[in-house]
Image (tube, rainbow, N blue to C red):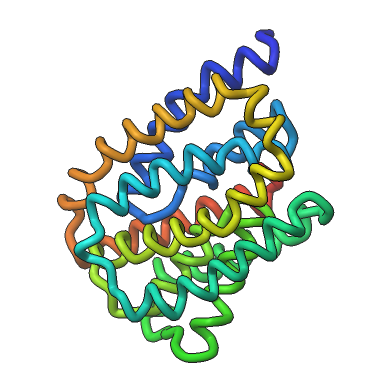
Amino acid sequence: MPPVDAVVVALLAPVAVAAGAIASVAGFGIGSLLTPLLTVRFGAAAAVTLVALPHALATAIRFARLRRFVDRPVLITFGIASAAGGLVGALAHAVLGSDILAVVLGILLLFVGLGGLTGLTANLRFSGLWSTVAGVASGVFGGLVGNQGGIRSAALLGTELNREAFVATSTAIGLVVDAARIPVYLATGGPTIVANLPIVGLAAVGVVVGTLLGEPVLRRIPEHRFRAVVSAILVALGIMLVAGVR
């Protein structure tokens, strides 16, 4: 059997490309796919730190290309709350265990994803205080366990955003969370990043390629099917988290 290091390195590029492409379609997915892979080799805490920079790079590129579709009111209300949550989660990242939180997140994503596929949550809407709560929660999970996009997208499914606005707004919020959490990661995990720059670089190249390849796919998904696609991804992510694949 090949050593774990060799397997992780061999899978890193294709998984990174797939993650970037999925994020272009759904507005999330890079941390959800890359973090579990790198956890196998580096452990959860280091994996979250190593994925942060490739995540931010791909998110910035996606934002630059979709920024005209951003829904500003949603970005302001949800984004500020997410940034605050992201900072709290990043500060707690080094000292708190994340297993229980990840399982709770997985169950929530399963509920929302299955509700989206079956139509049970078609009338669910997040507004006012609940939108703020969802924003804080998505930021906290992003800083703590590296999975911010799932709960953010679950909340945004309760809005009237079309597919372009959905992905663009989710991307903009993700970028705000990255801006809040990455300085903390650099301060607490800088040596880990420097020691593994080839891994970070390979992941970064992969997610950028995937981001560019995934954009044409987004334009081809019919509007009425887009939410079903996002719901299916949420279900898959929820299963991964509940099963302990982190």
Residue toward you, 152 or 169: 169
Q: For the N terminus, give its image quadrant.
A: top right
* Residue 199 drawn above or below residue 46: above
Q: Position of residue 35 (x, y in %)?
A: 60, 40
Q: Position of residue 80 (x, y in %)?
A: 50, 74
Residue 59 visible at all: yes
Residue 239 visible at all: no
Q: Position of residue 205 (x, y in %)?
A: 40, 27
Q: Identify the residue at image location x=46%, y=46%.
A: 56
Q: Is residue 189 left or right of 214 when viewed as pictured?
A: right
Q: Identify the residue at image location x=51%, y=25%.
A: 12
Q: Identify the residue at image location x=34%, y=40%.
A: 21
* Residue 110 drawn above or below residue 120: above
* Residue 203 drawn above or below residue 74: above
Q: Position of residue 81 (x, y in %)?
A: 54, 75
Residue furthest out toward the top: 1
Residue furthest out toward the bottom: 128
Q: Please identify the quarter of the rendering in which residue 17 is found.
A: top left
